[in-house]
């Protein structure tokens, strides 16, 4: 150990210490007791156990006590519902001393490897959430059991710009193979920090035995006894260190390149360490992990990732400006106007999360039947994947119905429209709905750009109209922009926030401004790229200009995903409001009129090229820009637009804009939000004369 408890307390005074306590447990069938170490930070399950320096020192002392007892086995478990979720990030984000960073990296290895190198059998009884360093602790043991109710299993480090640096990159591939390790450490992390299910963790071989939660500890001890007595020998697959390992590393590099464009040093280093694990012994592998982790702990990417983490895990749970929850009205039935793809996705989400009746209406029975059928089919898919039981599947399908008559909404508490993005259409729909619902029923619009206030202006009760803007695909993207119209009252707004929370969405309050937050900023980006192309910049140069940011897709690919017609419509809405900043490309108009949906086409080998028909119809000038010029131009435009939005009060603070882009547009976590990125790169100062945030990357309260 390189830090004393006193030194650790001085260096990290705010650490929430996880204490490790050893007790001896007599287990039937064993002639010596089991040393059972329990991890507990003294908080309830709302504050998971983490490891800072003092927590590692406590675990080291508990291991001293365990080994001294000469037990039949040593087992580590956690407090109720929590095993451990990794490093204490609150301490790490303030780390400024490189020598301390190295000591922390070494401490994790020094303590955890005692379990790996023990001549006494070691076990991890994973009784709940296990992330990051907690999973590395479990992997450091010889054997692992897992509670069947565990909901969080993952290595999130690469998502944050780090890497699993306490053994994860070396232990996991040598336990389950390189390809599975790439999935868990790289692919899942870069796929919005995807969690492993219990079944998947067992299938991959990360754990040896899944047990029920009611008597998990007792059953784990009995299983331990069978292993110690030699009655059970958990299978360990032979690891292919040849072509399969090569293929896994190639796949990892492809994922990292596709997701980050080389902008995340943690992801790149993780792949290097996974490759090293093929031949390295633990001494060599752990030394390489220490070097990598120590460097990353001092990198701005970490501070950026932690800023993003804090936004999503703290600010998103306490939305700025949301009214008191006590004002919210209960929602016992939901109506959806429309039965197209978006409306059907909403119906599925509402019925799954709220478990209340959901009724769809549309202009003809065929569309309604198609919408209801979509929901039923998706429920059946959930059943096939064993995400829900047969009984639940039947209940969910029974809750979804359709009707040609909006009188079916008479007892609905919450009605949301998802019809054509045209003001007159939406006004007419709400006027019709208002004739059938109670005065207290909430009327929500899923508009992506139109004024909520104008939509409500002619209604008898405009105070109950609220914007409820989802992002596509609804089931995947977690953001929900909740829009307060000029006359929206607190009860309607509180009900919208409460409903959004039940839907498991991260809600951000935005004012009734054209295109709100995400679409306004994306169209500002896209507008600059299209203008550059109109001026003569080649399509590929303009489209690649933002690659150094590591965005999930290029601007022209995003336009294809959203739909050029929708992009044009939102652009025209913004042009009406802000003609000086949101010009509409005549080329884009011709593109849409021609029925084109994509600039790019791909050959059989996946190589993109410009669609010749698009190339022919797009008229270009003679003033091309370089990729660097397009990038700087786009970033300057975004910086200026964000400043205007903040001055207009579209959101409460810059952090809310960061949160919107992280959760609604896929802005990379490791860049730390758009406003601190613009601050770090000097764009904010250059464009606005001042940064958006305080010097450095601010923590989120």
Image (cartoon, rainbow, N blue to C red):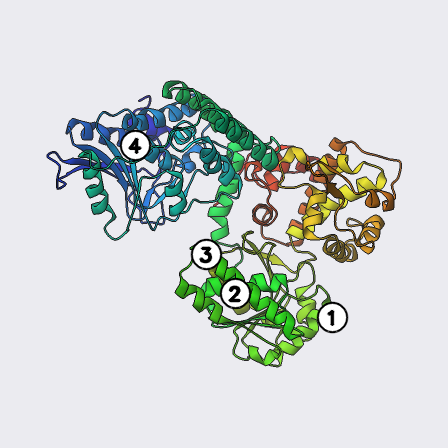
- Label 3 vs label 2, nearer the camera: 3
At label 1, counting other C-alpha atoms closer than 10 Å, the crowd grade (few under 14, some 14-19, many 20 or more) is few
Instruction: Tell me the SS state at disc 3.
Output: helix
Q: Kindly identify which residue carries mark 3.
A: 384
Cα distance in 3D space between marks 1 and 4 = 64 Å
Instruction: Tell me the SS state at disc 4.
Output: loop
- Label 1 vs label 3, nearer the camera: 3
Q: Kindly identify which residue carries mark 2.
A: 376
- Label 1 vs label 2, nearer the camera: 2
Where residue 115 sits, quadrant-wise, is top left
Q: Earlier in the sequence, mark 3 or mark 2?
A: 2
Instruction: Tell me the SS state at disc 2.
Output: helix
Instruction: Tell me the SS state at disc 1.
Output: helix
* Residue nearest the observer in this picture, 356 or 303: 356
Q: Kindly identify which residue carries mark 4.
A: 141
At label 2, counting other C-alpha atoms closer than 10 Å, the crowd grade (few under 14, some 14-19, many 20 or more) is some
531 sits to left or right of 503: right
Q: Earlier in the sequence, mark 1 or mark 4?
A: 4
Residue drawn where x is 46% and y is 30% of the image: 178
- Label 1 vs label 4, nearer the camera: 4
Residue 398 badge:
none
Q: Position of residue 235 (x, y in %)?
A: 31, 35
Where residue 134 sits, quadrant-wise, is top left
33 sits to left or right of 519: left
Residue drawn where x is 27% and y is 32% of the image: 59
Cα distance in 3D space between marks 1 and 2 = 32 Å
User: Where is 205 relative to 270, above or below?
Assistant: below
- Label 2 vs label 4, nearer the camera: 2
Q: Are marks 4 and 3 in contact (CB under 8 Å)?
A: no
Q: Kindly identify which residue carries mark 1.
A: 424
């Amino acid at each position: 150990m390189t830090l004393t408890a006193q030194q650790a307390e001085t260096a990290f005074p705010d650490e929430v210490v996880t204490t490790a306590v050893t007790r001896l447990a007599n287990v039937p069938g064993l002639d010596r007791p089991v040393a059972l170490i329990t991890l507990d930070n003294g908080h309830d399950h709302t504050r998971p156990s983490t490891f800072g320096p003092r927590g590692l020192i406590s675990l080291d002392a508990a291991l001293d006590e365990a080994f001294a007892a000469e037990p039949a086995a040593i087992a580590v478990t956690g407090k109720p519902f929590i095993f451990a979720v990794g490093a204490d990030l609150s301490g790490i984000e303030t780390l400024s001393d490189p020598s301390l960073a190295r000591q922390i990296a070494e401490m994790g290895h020094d303590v955890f490897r005692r379990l790996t190198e023990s001549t006494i059998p070691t076990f991890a009884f994973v009784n709940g959430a296990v992330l990051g360093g907690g999973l590395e602790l479990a992997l450091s043991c010889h054997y692992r059991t897992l509670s069947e109710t565990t909901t969080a299993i993952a290595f999130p480090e690469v998502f944050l710009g780090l890497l699993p640096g306490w053994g994860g990159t070396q232990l996991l591939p040598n336990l389950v193979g390189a390809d599975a390790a790439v999935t868990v450490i790289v692919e899942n992390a870069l796929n919005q920090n995807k969690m492993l299910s219990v079944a998947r963790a067992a299938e991959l071989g990360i754990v040896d035995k899944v047990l029920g939660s009611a008597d998990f500890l007792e059953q784990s001890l009995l299983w331990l006894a069978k292993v110690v007595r030699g009655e059970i020998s958990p299978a360990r697959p032979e690891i292919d260190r040849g072509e399969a390992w090569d293929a896994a590393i190639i796949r990892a590099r492809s994922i990292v390149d596709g997701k980050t464009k080389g902008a995340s040093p943690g992801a790149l280093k993780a792949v290097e360490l996974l490759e090293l694990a093929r031949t390295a012994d633990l001494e060599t592998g752990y030394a390489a992990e220490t070097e990598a982790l120590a460097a990353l702990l001092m990198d701005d990417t970490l501070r950026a990732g932690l800023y993003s983490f804090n936004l999503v895990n703290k600010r998103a749970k306490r939305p700025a400006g949301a009214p008191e929850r006590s004002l919210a009205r209960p929602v016992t039935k939901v109506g959806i106007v429309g039965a197209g793809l978006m409306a059907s996705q909403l119906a599925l989400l509402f019925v799954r999360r709220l478990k209340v009746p959901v009724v769809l209406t549309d202009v003809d029975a065929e569309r309604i039947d198609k919408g209801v059928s979509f929901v039923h089919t998706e429920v059946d898919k959930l059943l096939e994947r064993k995400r829900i039981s047969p009984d639940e599947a039947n209940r969910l399908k029974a809750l979804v119905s359709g009707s040609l008559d909006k009188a079916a909404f008479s007892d609905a508490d919450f009605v949301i429209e998802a019809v054509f993005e045209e003001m007159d259409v939406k006004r007419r729909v709400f006027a019709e709905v208002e004739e059938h619902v109670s005065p207290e029923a909430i009327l929500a619009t899923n508009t992506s750009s139109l004024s909520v206030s104008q939509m409500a202006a002619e209604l008898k009760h405009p105070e109950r109209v609220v914007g409820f803007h989802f992002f596509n695909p609804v089931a995947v993207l977690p953001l929900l922009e909740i829009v307060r119209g000029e006359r929206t009252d607190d009860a309607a707004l509180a009900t919208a926030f409460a409903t959004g929370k039940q839907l498991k969405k991260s809600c951000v309050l935005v004012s009734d401004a054209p295109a709100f937050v995400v679409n306004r900023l994306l169209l500002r980006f896209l507008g600059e790229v299209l203008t550059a192309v109109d001026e003569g910049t080649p399509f590929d140069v303009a489209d690649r200009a933002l690659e150094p940011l590591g965005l999930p897709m290029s601007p022209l690919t995003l336009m294809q995903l959203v739909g050029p017609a929708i992009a044009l419509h939102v652009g025209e809405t913004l042009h009406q409001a802000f003609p000086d900043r949101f010009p509409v490309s005549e080329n884009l108009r011709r593109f849409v009129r021609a029925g084109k949906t994509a600039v790019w086409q791909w050959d059989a080998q996946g190589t993109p090229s410009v669609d010749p028909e698009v190339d022919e119809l797009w008229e270009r000038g003679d003033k091309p820009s370089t990729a660097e010029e397009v990038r700087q131009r786009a970033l300057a435009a975004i910086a200026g637009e964000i400043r205007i939005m903040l001055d207009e009060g579209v959101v409460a603070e810059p952090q809310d804009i960061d949160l919107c882009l992280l959760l609604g547009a896929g802005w990379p976590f490791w860049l730390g939000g758009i406003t601190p990125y613009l601050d770090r790169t000097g764009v904010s100062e250059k464009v606005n004369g001042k940064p958006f945030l305080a010097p450095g990357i601010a923590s989120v309260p």
